Image (cartoon, rainbow, N blue to C red):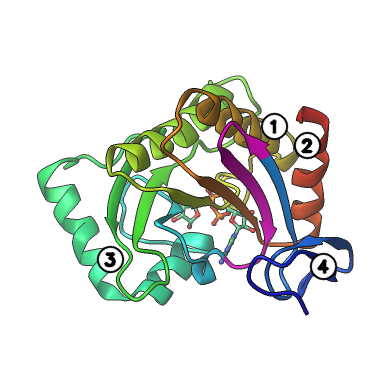
Amino acid sequence: MASGSTSSVLHCGRCSHKYICFLKSVAVMEFKVGKAVLQLTCGDITEIEADAIVNAANSSLMGGGGVDGAIHRAGGPKILEECKRIRETEWPDGLPTGKAVITSGRNLKAKHVIHAVGPVWHGGFQGEAELLKQVYRNSLKLAVARGLKVVAFPSISTGAYGYPIEAASIIAINTTKAFLENEDSLERVIHVLFSERDFRIYVGTASSIF
Ligand code: AR6
């Protein structure tokens, strides 16, 4: 088994396919962008060690299902308390789609959680692509403003919000790549995919972009 910085080809713990792997039992693909790395990983984002993981939240910031529920469960109730304070002080009417805010990571391995609201898919004619781009860009901007170096995203909007993952993966990767090309303080952006199918779609998209 490989560990630390030793690279080898392994089976992912969740996937049946082999990829270059830098971590124990986790599928990883990496692409260099300037001095930074854009990484694709298959796994559970609540297990990721990063300066921040991004939560696919809803406007209420009061938690929900999917990755939102998983992050609040793993991070503990203090994250919700911080979200309530943000609602009271900054966003009394809810966090608009495309925007992002930050809390601490509490019991998570990640130091912070960036809560961002992705668009609900309505067929693609209601500005969904631009809003999804803003989610990624605003989350990365917030990370830079806080001096963070390593940020991990789930595939925002592609679960309960119904955004087709093929189209969403193009926006996720292109927006990350463009951001890293113009901003050299981030070291690593990780896209964490929760299923073999999603991971393979992101790998296909990244391979056609890089
Ligand atoms: N780690 C990584 N990815 C995950 C995890 C996990 N632990 N759990 C789910 N995913 P979703 P959305 C993937 O529905 O579409 C919530 O109720 C999942 O497979 O979590 O933006 C919020 O409160 C999918 O690929 O987020 C909102 O109301 C991706 O995360 C609403 O859902 C996003 O799925 C947001 O919907």
Find residue 133 and name its label.
none
Helix, strand or loop for disc 1: helix
User: Marks 4 and 2: in contact by CB < 8 Å?
Assistant: no
Q: Position of residue 68 (x, y in %)?
A: 45, 60
Residue wearing tag 3: 79
| Residue at (45, 41) in percent of width and height | 186
Q: Nearer the viewer, mark 4 or mark 3?
A: 4
User: The N terminus lies in which quarter of the figure?
Assistant: bottom right
Three-letter residue code for mark 3: Ile
Three-letter residue code for mark 2: Thr
Magenta residues?
32-44
Residue wearing tag 4: 15
Q: CA distance from mark 4 to mark 1?
A: 21 Å
| Residue at (10, 45) in percent of width and height | 89
First in sequence: mark 1 or mark 2?
1
Three-letter residue code for mark 4: Cys
Q: CA distance from mark 3 to mark 2?
A: 33 Å
Is-magenta flag for residue 39?
yes
Q: CA distance from mark 4 to mark 3?
A: 31 Å
Find residue 170 and name its label.
1
For label 4, count other residues whose C-alpha is less than 10 Å away and answer few (under 14), some (14-19) or many (20+): some
Q: Position of residue 167 (x, y in %)?
A: 71, 32
Judge whether 131 appears above or below 192 on screen. above
For label 3, count other residues whose C-alpha is less than 10 Å away and answer few (under 14), some (14-19) or many (20+): many
User: Marks 2 and 1: in contact by CB < 8 Å?
Assistant: yes
Residue wearing tag 2: 205
Is-magenta flag for residue 50?
no
